Image (cartoon, rainbow, N blue to C red):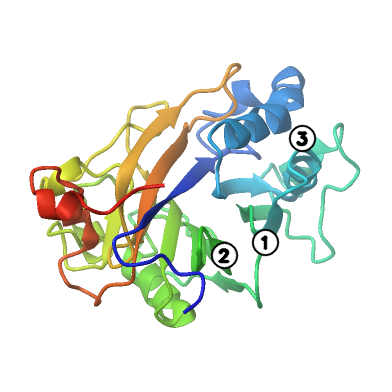
Amino acid sequence: MAGLPAPGDTYRVNVLTYNVCAAGNRAGTCVRDLTPQRRRTWAGQVSALIRSRDVDVASFTEMCYAQVGLLRHELPGYHLVWYGYARGGGVGREDRCRTLWRDLTPHTAPPDGRTFGVALALRNGTQGPPLRRLLRADAPAAPGETVHPRGLLCARGDVGPRRSVCCVTHISGTETPRQVTGLVKRYAEGAPVILTGDFNREPGDAQLTGVYGMGLGDGGYTEADAPACGSLRRGGDPTTRGGRKIDYIFASEADYRPGGAEALRTDPELSDHLALAGTLIGTEPRPRRDGGPWRGSCPASPRRRRGRRR
């Protein structure tokens, strides 16, 4: 197929995912990040992160619709895709996505009124209809836990030299990662996949075994910040203020190997999460489930070093 990398070639894909906690949360951990002074810096800081990291695909969770327009103004070269599946939380009938962001833009709500959700920003645009799916609660809620709407958004687009599927999700304990990967697989139809977002589970969680491949589980995904040379360890930088790693940059292991990732702070702080930026090394197509091209990242074998990077 024209445009695909030649055998032995690789290419870099830069990805960023960020839980922006834009409407605050019940725990109150974002209140200090949502002051007028800090909100005025939001679009400039986030767009600067994306540009400075030469990001190809960015994703956002706990986002308000108002921020889509603000970010679109700062990133005219990117195509933003939005999926709103709830109203911004608040006391009584208050919609905090409207009340918190209306001083910065009059465009705080889409026609359907769902002001809270997830978004993607793709540098090379999109092709075809996106997947917008409200997730079902397929795991029991903990005692006293409230089941909130959760969603999955995917879009097709050119990422590097290949048509790929880019997805973002935000799940809680009542939605399983297997539900997400099942929906992504059906939408992707064999195309390379980049799957990002807030999974609300730390790397060692048993439910992520169905996502991880690389010898770390029975799924089919590598992770951007996996250790080099196929070291069998799940981990990565903490992505929350409290020191937990619950945000991820996954990619189909038949198409990508890890290139490293790091959690990024902003100044002033904008959320109770940190932005997670990572690099994926795209490879020529390989048979699915062949052990993953990530094994080729070890420099010890001269035969495996012949591929050039660009």
Name the residue located 50 percent from the left edge and 43 percent from the top edge. 16
Q: Secondary structure at mark 1?
A: loop
Q: Is residue 59 left or right of residue 228?
A: right
Residue 307: horizontal and vertical position, in percent? 27, 54
Disc 2 designates what residue? 158
Disc 3 designates what residue? 100
Q: Is residue 199 left or right of residue 288?
A: right
Disc 1 designates what residue? 125
Q: Looking at the picture, which amino acid does disc 2 mark?
A: Asp
* Residue 75 in view: yes
Q: Residue 177 got which mark?
A: none
Q: Are marks 2 and 1 in contact (CB under 8 Å)?
A: yes
Number of other residues with Cα within 10 Å of mark 2, as a class: few under 14, some 14 to 19, many 20 or more: some
Q: Secondary structure at mark 3?
A: helix
Query: Quick one: 299 or 27, which is closer to the camera?
Result: 299
Q: Secondary structure at mark 2?
A: strand
Number of other residues with Cα within 10 Å of mark 1, as a class: few under 14, some 14 to 19, many 20 or more: some
Residue 139: horizontal and vertical position, in percent? 33, 67
Upstream in sequence: badge 3 or badge 2: 3
Residue 94 occupies quadrant: top right
Q: Are marks 3 and 1 in contact (CB under 8 Å)?
A: no
Name the residue located 82 percent from the left edge and 53 percent from the top edge. 109
Q: Is residue 185 left or right of residue 15?
A: left
